[in-house]
Image: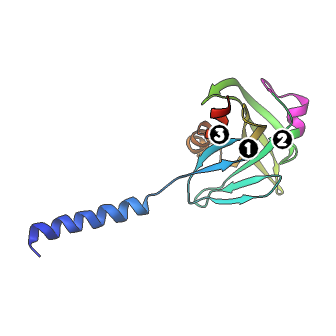
Amino acid sequence: MKMGSFRYLAVALILGFTLVGFNLAENYVHEEIGVQFWIPDSWELEVTEEITVARAQDAPLTLILLTSELQVVDHVTPRLFDEISKVVFKPEVQKESGTEEINGLLHFRAEGSALYEGEIVDWELAFIAGGRKSMLAIALGDILDQRGMIDTVFRSFTLVESEIEEE
């Protein structure tokens, strides 16, 4: 093999291993709600009939998704508070960001602190409406350091293709 060919082979192998090694994301489809969203593929995903939990392996961060009976939310109401309380104990709301449309879905965001698995944790939620059902996406853990990741995941929610075709 000539030296030039060897260089091209080496570059191709390095590039190939790099692309395989940095496959950092996958889209997850939540059929019941009719949305898909991005999560890093290094996260552990646990799906049951009632709840979907995604846990980061490299940071103290957990994302919990559950369906909601509420239709539209533009502030933390007692009913939304009850829904949050399904996941955490004694939630305290510290900030509400209002409602925004992202990727054709209506998002309301709020954050605060609560007890989760016996510890006080920070949380941030996105109430998302516009799919087959409304949902709560609640991030728990290191909210300050992981705000960029949380925002990226929350903003990645889109309707599943079949939902777009039906409109």
Q: Quadrant of residue 153?
A: top right
How many neighbours does mark 3 have within 10 angstroms: few (below 14), some (14-19), or many (20 or more)? few
Residue type of the residue flagged with mark 2: Ile
- Mark before the other along the chain sequence, 1 or 3: 1
Looking at the image, do the residues carrying marks 1 and 3 touch, with CB atoms under 8 Å apart?
Answer: no
Q: Which residues are magenta?
A: 72-82
SS category of the residue bearing label 3 = helix
129 or 162, which lies in front? 162
For the point 11% across and 76% down, which residue is it? 1
Task: Examine the structure image and report whether residue 17 is included in the region drawn in magenta.
Answer: no
Q: Quadrant of residue 17?
A: bottom left
| Residue 10 percent location from the top left of the image | 22, 68
| Residue 119 percent location from the top left of the image | 80, 54
Q: Which residue is mark 2?
A: 84
Residue type of the residue flagged with mark 1: Ile
25 relative position to 81: left or right: left
Between the residue at mark 3 and the residue at mark 2, the CA separation in whole angstroms equals 29 Å
Q: Which mark is residue 28?
A: none
Between the residue at mark 1 and the residue at mark 3, the CA separation in whole angstroms equals 25 Å
Looking at the image, do the residues carrying marks 2 and 1 touch, with CB atoms under 8 Å apart?
Answer: yes
158 or 82, which lies in front? 158
For the point 16% across and 66% down, which residue is it? 7
